[in-house]
Amino acid sequence: EVQLVDSGGGLVKPGGSLRLSCAASGFPFINAWMSWVRQAPGRGLEWVGRIQSKTDGGTIDYAAPVKGRFTVSRDDSKNMLFLQMNSLRTEDTAVYYCTVDSGGGPAWWGQGTLVSVSS
Amino acid sequence: DVVLTQSPVSLPVTLGQPASISCRSSESLLYSDGNTYLTWFQQRPGQSPRRLIYKISTRDSGVPDRFSGSGSGTDFTLKISRVEAEDVGVYYCMQGTHWPPYTFGQGTKLEIK
């Protein structure tokens, strides 16, 4: 069974940094393309970024609002996905979900971790 | 970026009655490999999104067969043949053809009348 456990969220001031983690199990993580998707309070879903498997090239793509501020990375030896968030803004406040991509997009989702950016 | 427009935004339905949600894309979602990467998600209150259907009409394991997807090109539909209480939530379409980025529709909130 695919399991994704998101962690690392919290309250941070504007301009601050936070690192989110996602512990994956139940599937061959090393071959998986992984994404982060976020959802602002009471709003819809917004894709944040995606990392390919190293065997497929390891390309990392970002949504325009986070490019240059957020970094997606992975540790295949520990089945972990990360999202380093710098220069945080109030509009980055959201629940952040780790997902496994399959069949053209996010297939399995973590439980999410809440990031609040406020002074 | 590809824009997905869902309708209706709010969908009140009587238990046991059918429901239908439309998703229209600003561009054709037919990919060069012959697949159309249009996905439907369900998000129940307080829960993470759950994928229901991918590539227009392929149901995920464990998804009841009262859910079905159809469409082609730029117009797609999610149908629920007989709405049950557990179907309450927000439904999103998403395209994975023109990436990055993946883009989502704005959501359709299904509620019981």
Image (cartoon, coloured by chain):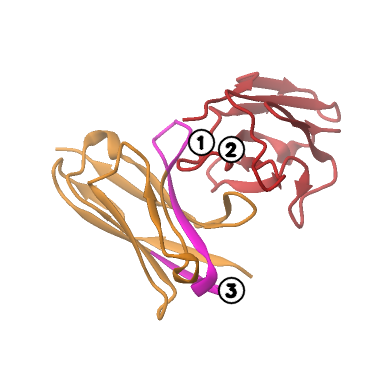
Q: Report the amino acid beneath label 1.
A: Thr
Measured in 3D between alpha carbons, the distance from the residue under mark 2 to the one under mark 1, in whole angstroms, is 6 Å
State whether residue B49 is above or below residue A33. Answer: above
Q: Tell me which residue sits at (57%, 49%) in the image.
A: A105
Please identify, in this view, whether the residue under mark 1 or under mark 3 is nearer the observer: 1
The picture quadrant where one finds residue B21 is top right
Q: Report the amino acid beneath label 2.
A: Met
Q: Report the amino acid beneath label 3.
A: Gly
Q: Which residue in the protein does label 3 denote?
A: A26
Q: Are marks 2 and 1 on the same chain?
A: yes
Which circle marks residue B94 in the picture? Answer: 2
Measured in 3D between alpha carbons, the distance from the residue under mark 1 to the one under mark 3, in whole angstroms, is 27 Å
Relative side of B38 to A42, left or right: right
Q: Colour of chain A?
A: orange
Q: How many numbered callouts?
A: 3
* Image chain in red: B
Among numbered discs 2 and 1, the one appearing first in the sequence: 2
In this rendered view, identify the residue nearer to me: B8 or B55.
Answer: B55
Which circle marks residue B103 in the picture? Answer: 1
**Is residue A103 among the parts visible in the rendering?**
yes
